[in-house]
Image (spheres, helix red, strand yellow):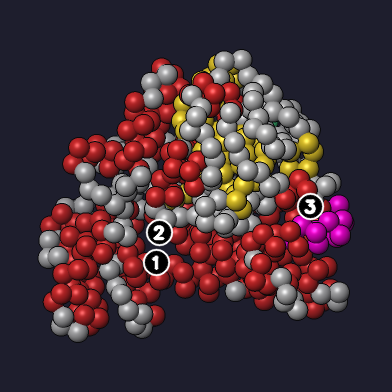
Amino acid sequence: MARFVFDNSYARDLPGFYAPCPPQTVRAPHLLFLNQALADELHLDLDADAAQAHAELFAGNALPAGAAPIAQAYAGHQFGGFSPQLGDGRALLIGEVIDRHGRRRDIAFKGSGRTPFSRNGDGKAAVGPMLREVLIGEAMHALGIPTTRALAVVATGEPVQRETVLPGAVLTRVAASHLRVGTFEYFAARDDIERVRRLADYAIARHDPDIAGSATPYLDFLRAAIRRQATLVAQWMQVGFIHGVMNTDNMSIAGETIDYGPCAFLEQYVPERAFSSIDTHGRYAYRNQPGIAQWNLARLAETLLPLIDADQKRAVALATAAIEEFPPLYRERWLAGMRDKLGLNATMADDADSALIDDWLALLETAQVDFTLAWRRLAAAAEGMAEPLRTLFADSAALDAWLVRWQTRCRAEDGGDGRTAARRGERMRSINPWLIPRNHRVEEALAAASDHGDLGPFNALLAALRTPYNETPARQHLADPAPGEFTASYRTFCGT
Ligand code: AMP
Ligand code: MG
């Protein structure tokens, strides 16, 4: 029997913030994916169990001792409009464990059946979208981007009715917490200031213990959440990740990427790109993500106003100042990341570096160059091999002029030290991935698994995504951009 050492602080400390709810049992559970490395990190004792026992466990048919399944309450701004009552409609927090690094981690099911928050939904999930969470989440993790992670996926052996009938699945997801901006909004919308305070105290104890003794803990907490989000979104932008549904209920206070629904990666550098079928106005387009993050954080700030200061005017002034820190913070993180990607070590003149980066991106945009390939080939250009990069551009005159500026900046930094220059390409290849989850390869892998029960392409892609910086000729087909026609007509869907 599997053994988890649970310590369920949310269930224990926050009664009234959730509804206890058992998972629905499923007919014929079959294990599709198990993240053994993550299980080890979480101290989960699975070793003695066979695959069928794992399937029963991660289907929710046989909960481990000490699990306390609950559906968490939350609200959320969805595409700008407020829904006061969302909550875990198809998810359950089954408990928390302390991992090998001493960090508290949530273990949650997604797709485990109806809860008191299900409204008209069936509480279920399908194989394709749950395996998508595995692929994208593990890719993000390998790219060093904070993210929730998939521990297991079980096919339920039951059909799920969507536009077509799909095979059902349950995902087990691990998160630093499932506290969302929308969790705060739920209680603030009910004018339940005491519960907002308890939630904030809980969040501070869990994510920002160093500010617990501060004279202004709630303002400090807001600022910490702002810093985490600025860092996260800067990292998204640097790999071309488009979340696709940045509603406030999908924004984690812990600063992890959460809820992989209609997400996708940029191919050509087209900043206004949005792939989600329901994002008709491009609210959550690539280039809007920093602004939307700030907008969401302003919704968080509103919920904290009564805690920030008893004088409402003063509270608003303090919270506004904190929110206004987002753009420069984001810019600083973004600039630091872009300097790294460009192979620049030192912080030199910000204005000149900003212009260098902006002009590079303008080149990519004008020529509609593949974002990932361009950065990767720039690493070769650092070693004097600019030809592979040039071939990405129909007209390379503007590129050549820019390369001269970039090389001048690099030389200024190296101070004539040839060894520094030689290491630049290598360093750039350890920062600019060779492989991202290419949308067409993700779709292929999911279709094979969902339509034909063939996990081969999924497993091959997953293995490749774990080492995104290693150029591996045998995996070239996974790294190549999608045909232009594919990207032009590509639409993603919410995993409901
Ligand atoms: P999402 O778009 O997945 O972030 O979900 C938004 C809200 O809809 C959350 O409250 C979910 O719990 C709920 N929801 C999504 N899919 C389902 C479903 N199949 N059954 C019940 N609730 C769902
Ligand atoms: Mg969600």
Residue appearing at x 75%, y 55% in the figure = 184
Query: Given the image, on which type of amino acid does mark 1 rest?
Result: Gly
Q: How crowded is mark 1: few (under 14 residues within 10 Å), some or many (20 or more)?
A: some
Q: In this view, does 291 lie above or below 166?
A: below
Residue 416 visible from this viewpoint? yes
Task: Give the SS element for disc 1.
Answer: helix
- First-in-chain label (3 vs 2): 3
- First-in-chain label (1 vs 3): 3
The residue carrying mark 3 is 13
- Measured in 3D between alpha carbons, the distance from the residue under mark 1 to the one under mark 3, in whole angstroms, is 39 Å
Q: In which quarter of the image is the C terminus?
A: top right
Query: Given the image, on which type of amino acid does mark 2 rest?
Result: Gln
The residue carrying mark 2 is 238
Whether label 2 touches label 1, CB < 8 Å: yes
Residue 198: within the magenta?
Answer: yes
Viewer-side residue, 322 vs 64: 64
Task: Give the SS element for disc 2.
Answer: helix
Task: Give the SS element for disc 3.
Answer: helix
Q: In this view, does 22 lie above or below 472?
A: above
Q: Where is residue 335 in the image (x, y as percent from the top left)?
A: 41, 71
The residue carrying mark 1 is 337
Q: Where is residue 136 in the image (x, y as percent from the top left)?
A: 45, 42
135 left or right, relative to 395 = right
- Residue range (magenta): 189-200
Whether label 1 touches label 3, CB < 8 Å: no
Query: Given the image, on which type of amino acid does mark 3 rest?
Result: Asp
Q: In which quarter of the image is the N terminus?
A: top right
Residue appearing at x 46%, y 37% in the figure = 35
